[in-house]
Structure formats: C-alpha cells, structure tokens
Amino acid sequence: MSDAATPRSPLRFLPLALFALLAALFLVRLFSGDASRIPSALIGKPAPAFDLPPLAGLKDVPGLSTEDLRKGHVSLVNVFASWCGPCRQEHPVLMAIARDGALKEKGVELYGLSYKDEAKNALEFLEEGGNPFARIGVDPGGRTAIDFGVYGVPETFVVRGDGVILYKHVGPLTPSAVATTLLPEIEKAQAGSSPSKD
C-alpha cells in the first residue's frame, strides 16, 4: 500500500497554527498602547535595597542608595549607559529637567544609575553632554537594575519621598513625554497619591 493512500492527520498543522497565533499576539501587543507604559511589578512598592558607589572620577557627585530615596522629596531615578543610543538621544532632555527651576523649587531630585558601563566610558559620556544628576550609583553587574525590574535602558522611575516607586517610563524621555506624563506623575507623587496603574 502506498503512502499516498494513507490519510494525513490534521494535527500536522498544529505547530504552524500555534506559531501563527503567537505571532499575532506579539504583533497586537507591539502595536497597541504606549510602549513607555510597560507595567512594573514594583509600582506601589518600596524601591529595592541597594547601596551603589559613586562614579570614579566625577567630583562632588556621591553614590546612590535606597536611603537617598527616602528623604522626603520626590526622586527621579534614570537608568542610563554610555553605550546606549537612546540614552544619548534622551540626555539633552535630562539636562533640561536638571535646569528646570520649577522642579528644583519643588525639591525634586534627579539621580542616575549607571548600568553595566565602564567607569571611564560613563565619565566621558557625562563630560561630553553634561551631568544632570545630583547622585550617580554605579551598577556594573546590573544587579540593582534587575531588582528595579529594568527591561533595558533608558528607564526612568518616579519615587515618592518615602521610597515607594509610583511610575516607570520605559525608553528615552522626550519633551512631550516630560510635559504630558512625567510632570503629572511627579505632581501625584508630591501629593502622596496612589501609584499610576498604567
């Protein structure tokens, strides 16, 4: 009896159907919503415990620890790296935030977390574009970033004065994102309101 006469099982198409379904789900998730609003398990929870050293060679800029996020003022924690193209794109926006008198008057502090970077490269990056950060913690192995739930750089966290993370922005900040999203989240944090559910 030849193989041609044997009926083929419809199950042979199952792997192809599963692949097509997964691909469709991926595309729907990719093109729906705002990628900067990827949910974080830490929203509404205290920042993880960490104590990072300062960036060697950068004068008068101390390291960063959990205690710095619990001093009563709202903190922005920006995770960056010199090797990250979007971080370079975002850097002028961070410099503008650092110069913003309104944020300074409100006591908002901008902190940096140098992610998986060589100290000399991070130093050159900040010397070239300016240093917007009041404190910088060096995270060469990426452990603290993992504890924060970082997907990739850059990411920026809004942290309430008691150390609770209220918001996470994924990707480079733009002037529009600062005006329409980041500033309202900072205002919520200063008012002590609940975390954003986005």
Image (cartoon, grey):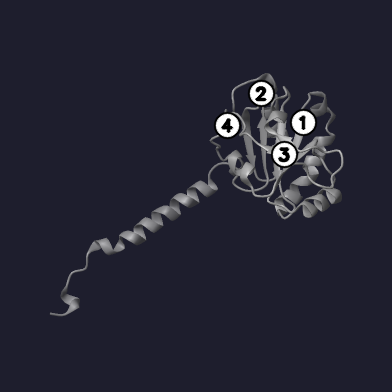
Instruction: Confirm or deny contact between disc 1 and disc 4 (CB under 8 A).
Output: no
Residue ID at (55%, 30%): 197
Give the residue number, with chain letter if any, for mark 3: 176
Circle nearer the N terminus (1, 4): 4
Circle nearer the N terminus (4, 3): 4
Q: Which quadrant is home to the N terminus?
A: bottom left
Give the residue number, with chain letter if any, for mark 1: 109
Give the residue number, with chain letter if any, for mark 2: 162
Label 1 environment density (alpha carbons within 10 Å; few <14, some 14–19, many ≥20): many
Which percent across, then down, holds residue 5? 16, 75
Residue ID at (84%, 47%): 57
* Residue 39, quarter of the rendered image: top right
Distance in Å between CA atoms under marks 1 and 4: 19 Å
Instruction: Confirm or deny contact between disc 2 and disc 3 (CB under 8 A).
Output: no
Instruction: Confirm or deny contact between disc 3 and disc 1 (CB under 8 A).
Output: no
Give me the disc on residue 43.
Answer: 4
Distance in Å between CA atoms under marks 2 and 3: 28 Å
Label 3 environment density (alpha carbons within 10 Å; few <14, some 14–19, many ≥20): few
Distance in Å between CA atoms under marks 4 and 3: 22 Å
Which percent across, then down, holds residue 24? 44, 53
**3 displayed left or right of 66:** left
Q: Amino acid at mark 1?
A: Glu
